[in-house]
């Protein structure tokens, strides 16, 4: 039988709530490792890191604020259910990214480990959210909108934005930390690419 024809198993409200909690905790832990190691990532999270390093304001504050303009695009393209779940996920990541540093004490962190493990944690957290019809919003929604409206290839636009974030990071961070950030981004995207494929996971909400 074609995997697409298999009966779907809808997630319950309880399952969605638990996934939201666990997924955002994974992302927040990855963000904490990145902050500790002074690293970057792409998308709106990368913008929030840049603003955190430039201003001294917490990542969580910037991450929440940067995502605000993108919600109307999410409503137009994904609908209210997806948008509300995404709003909740962004709010929880913003909150947990500030609390995690109080819950754990990292005395020392090798930057290479922070880049790889932080990228993997964020990727796993995003994967959990994707499978329960939520996301971390921002640039991901924008590039899909630009593709639909103007025919711009979403992957290329995403790559250009992430590349610009990394280049901007050179003005604030040592070159070796930007290089490690690129390595962490590769780890993050491999987690998504290897595990988020149509037909592989049939649960729906």
Image (cartoon, grey):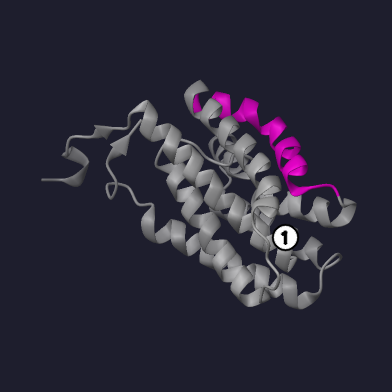
Q: Position of residue 40 (x, y in %)?
A: 70, 61
Q: Quadrant of the C terminus?
A: top left
Residue 44 in view of the camera: no
Q: Nearer the viewer, residue 37 or 48?
A: 37
Q: Position of residue 137 (x, y in %)?
A: 59, 39
Provide the secondary structure element on which disc 1 rests: helix
Residue that protrudes farthest toward the right in the picture: 55
Q: Nearer the viewer, residue 23 or 130?
A: 23
Inspect the magenta stretch and tell me whether residue 167 lies in it: no
Residue drawn at (56%, 37%) of the image = 89
Q: Quadrant of the N terminus?
A: top left
Residue drawn at (54%, 26%) of the image = 84
Residue drawn at (64%, 57%) of the image = 104
Span colored in magenta: 57-79
The answer to whether 193 appears left or right of 172 in the picture is left
Quarter of the image holding residue 96?
A: top right
Quarter of the image holding residue 117?
A: bottom right
Inspect the magenta stretch and tell me whether residue 59 lies in it: yes
Residue 187 in view of the camera: yes
Vertical order, 162 against 1 (above or below): below
Magenta stretch: dominant secondary structure: helix
The answer to whether 139 appears left or right of 49 in the picture is left
Q: Nearer the viewer, residue 133 or 20?
A: 20
Residue that numbered label 1 is attached to: 35
Q: Position of residue 14 (x, y in %)?
A: 38, 30
Vertical order, 118 against 111 (above or below): above
Q: Give the mark count.
A: 1
The answer to whether 23 appears left or right of 164 in the picture is left
Residue drawn at (38%, 27%) of the image = 13
Q: Residues within 10 Å of mark 1 (few under 14, many from 20)?
A: many
């Amino acid at each position: 039988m074609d995997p697409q024809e298999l009966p779907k198993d809808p997630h319950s409200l309880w399952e969605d709530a638990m996934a939201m909690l666990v997924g955002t905790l994974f992302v927040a832990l990855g963000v904490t490792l990145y902050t500790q190691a002074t690293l970057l990532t792409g998308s709106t999270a990368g913008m929030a890191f840049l603003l955190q390093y430039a201003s001294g304001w917490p990542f969580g504050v910037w991450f929440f604020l940067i995502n605000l303009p993108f919600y109307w695009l999410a409503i137009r393209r994904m609908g209210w259910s997806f948008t509300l779940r995404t709003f909740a996920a962004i709010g929880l990541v913003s909150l947990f990214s500030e609390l995690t540093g109080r819950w754990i004490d990292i005395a020392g962190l090798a930057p290479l480990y922070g880049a790889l493990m932080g990228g993997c944690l964020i990727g796993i957290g995003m994967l959990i959210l994707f499978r329960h019809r939520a996301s971390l919003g921002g640039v991901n929604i924008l590039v899909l909108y630009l593709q639909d409206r103007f025919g711009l290839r979403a992957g290329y636009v995403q790559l250009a934005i992430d590349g610009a974030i990394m280049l901007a990071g050179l003005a604030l961070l040592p070159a070796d930390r930007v290089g490690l950030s690129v390595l962490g981004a590769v780890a993050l995207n491999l987690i998504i690419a290897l595990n988020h494929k149509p037909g592989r996971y049939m649960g729906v909400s």
